[in-house]
Amino acid sequence: MTQPMNFNISALTLVFKKSTEVIPLTKISYFYGQMGAGKSSIARLIYYCLGGDLDFSPALQSEFVSAEISLSINKFNIVIDRARESDQVHVKWSENDEELDLILPARKADGILIPNTEIEVLSDLLFHFAGIDPPKVRKSKTKEESALARLSFIDMLWYCYLDQDSFDSDFFHLGEDAHVFKRLKSRDVLRFILGFHQEKVAELESLLQELHIKKIQFSEASKSLQQALIDADVETEAEILIKVDSLKKDSDVIDQQLLVHRKNRSNIPHGTDKLREKGRLLSYEIESLENAIPEIEKIIDQDKRHKNEIMTLGIKVKRVASARAVLAGVTFDFCPRCAQKLPERESDLCGVCGQEEPVEGESNLNADVLEQDTKSRISELEESINLHSEQLRRIRRKAADLNLQKQKINDELSSQMAQYDSAYLSNALVLERQKAEIGQQILNFEKLIKLPQKVRELQKKASETQVEETQIRQDLEEARKGAESNLSNLVRLKELFLDCLLRSKLSGFTANSEVEISHKDFLPEVTRPDVGDVATTSFANLSSGGKKTLFKACYGLAIHRLAVEIGALLPTFLIIDSPMKNISERENIEQFQGFHDLIYDLASDELAQTQFILIDKEYLPPTDEQNLDFSSRHMAPESIEYPPLIPYYS
């Protein structure tokens, strides 16, 4: 069956300061020789060109300039170039009889780069060449409303590049000791390979995210309208009607006052006197509010300063703890201050100051406790800052409203003082203006009466969306269970893994052995029922580093075999860097021979379309009968006959 990512690397071109090295790659490329010749750097630089990080060896630190790989993915011929310490790659390819090239981020997305596509980073472009959309999974595996995140091509490479450094210490990031983010991503990769994450699941996850966003939009809109009503001191239609009724009564009272003024035109105080009194009261209230503002601002500034100080102290505590951790294992023979030789001291005394060594937890503060206390205090300060900021906003708004009212009174007072009509006329004008203002307020509140209806409408939509979201979540759960209930691919993976273990002649495993792989963590465990007390073998309890490397390599081979059988999403190449790093080829000749025979047999049969790059310290070629497209390179430091990766470097 054809796989979606038929992947083949034809050459790796490395530019150094004094030379350019072209390394051709065949169906099986075998690099072997002495350590320090740059064998592992070949694999690391391929990984670097595909978007990975690069740990520079001393030779690469000194001489490396850039790397370029030539490869094909399905029908596309591609060249990827990446300069030293660059966050971007330069990609050239042909599409529809057109030569194209693009500079894009290696890992960190910065927006769509090609219109009408989802291409943001190198990973997206590689999936585009494969003719598939970037797979998407939930960021959080515990929250259904979590946003969807793309599964990166680099995540896939965990099962295509078995690197030397983590070969015998990490099992594809699946173990509990792995970083939680990598562990969940690694499981996502296996779910895609095994078919646990089907198109129906992806479709429902996408729909669930859209509904969740809609629900949030409806909820936020209703909250905004509710806040507008709260700011107007009304929240329901009934309250608005009560407010309107109260204003109408005030208007009726003013009408009655006007009638009284008409009947009693004598002994009526002048309207300007009332305006002055009202202006004075407003001035007192405004002054009180303005005096409160700097006090609240001062409290906010103090809280912010305290928050920053606590954050700074937290950082200093971490630095001190780190420094103590680093210096705890340092033994001083000479005084770090005066450089004089230190006297001999007892083992329980500090070699520098001569005091008793402190006991952790007694004389030293616990860094974790300090960090927790710091977070708690920062949270309290942030809450205080938010509360005071909201109070400050309300006071300023109220002060602005009062200033506006006072300005109106001042303008009216100035106008009346300029005309200075009779007491009756001035009071009548004041009352008429008050009646007009009340009338305008009534109109405003009558307009607000539509807002509670809109709030109810938005809340109803949010509730309906919540119901729909709940139903989609149930459908999604059923779809996931349905995808995972078909364990035929997982059963086949168990069979292929045991087959690899037996054919590699790894000691401790027999045809009677049974493999268990949980669909939750995908960690393989092997038991032997034919042995009295059933013992379980896993990567974690293998005592031999050599067994760990072969155990992991066999699992990687089994995954590639399964991917070929079911046409799964997995690049068709496998880099194995130093499978014999902990194994003597002479003392363990059977396992050395068995593992390589397994590789060559698979490459000539099931994995005929898979490219292998093997890196090791010793060499074992395939037989003529296996008829493989095979190349090898012997490498040794400072050798002319077997040149290292950087021929001139010494």
Image: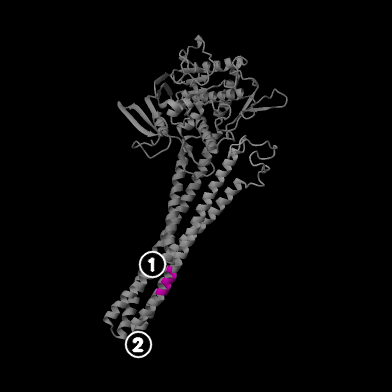
Q: Is residue 400 visible?
A: yes
**Residue 59 spot, x, y in % from top left:** 46, 25
**Residue 465 spot, x, y in % from top left:** 46, 50
Q: Which residues are magenta?
A: 283-290
Q: Are marks 1 and 2 in contact (CB under 8 Å)?
A: no
Pointer 2 residue = 268
The kind of secondary structure element at disc 2 is loop
Secondary structure mostly seen in the magenta stretch: helix
| Residue at position x 39%, y 39% in the image | 110
Q: Which mark is residue 566?
A: none
Classed neighbour count for the residue bearing mark 1: other residues with Cα under 10 Å, few (<14), some (14–19), many (≥20): few
**Residue 380 spot, x, y in % from top left:** 54, 56
The kind of secondary structure element at disc 1 is helix
Q: Please tell me which residue lies in front, 267 or 617.
A: 617
Q: Please tell me which residue lies in front, 645 or 576.
A: 645
Q: Is residue 436 left or right of residue 609?
A: left
Pointer 1 residue = 400
Q: Is residue 289 magenta?
A: yes
The alpha-carbon separation of the residues under discs 1 and 2 comes to: 33 Å
**Residue 184 spot, x, y in % from top left:** 53, 37
Sequence-wise first label, 1 or 2: 2
Colouring chosen for the image of the structure? one colour
Q: Is residue 646 magenta?
A: no
- What kind of residue is marked 1? Ala
Q: Is residue 268 left or right of residue 203?
A: left
* Rendered view: 627 above or below 168: above
| Residue that sits furthest to the right in the current view | 532
Q: Is residue 232 left or right of residue 538?
A: left
| Residue at position x 50%, y 23% in the image | 40
Q: Is residue 436 visible?
A: no
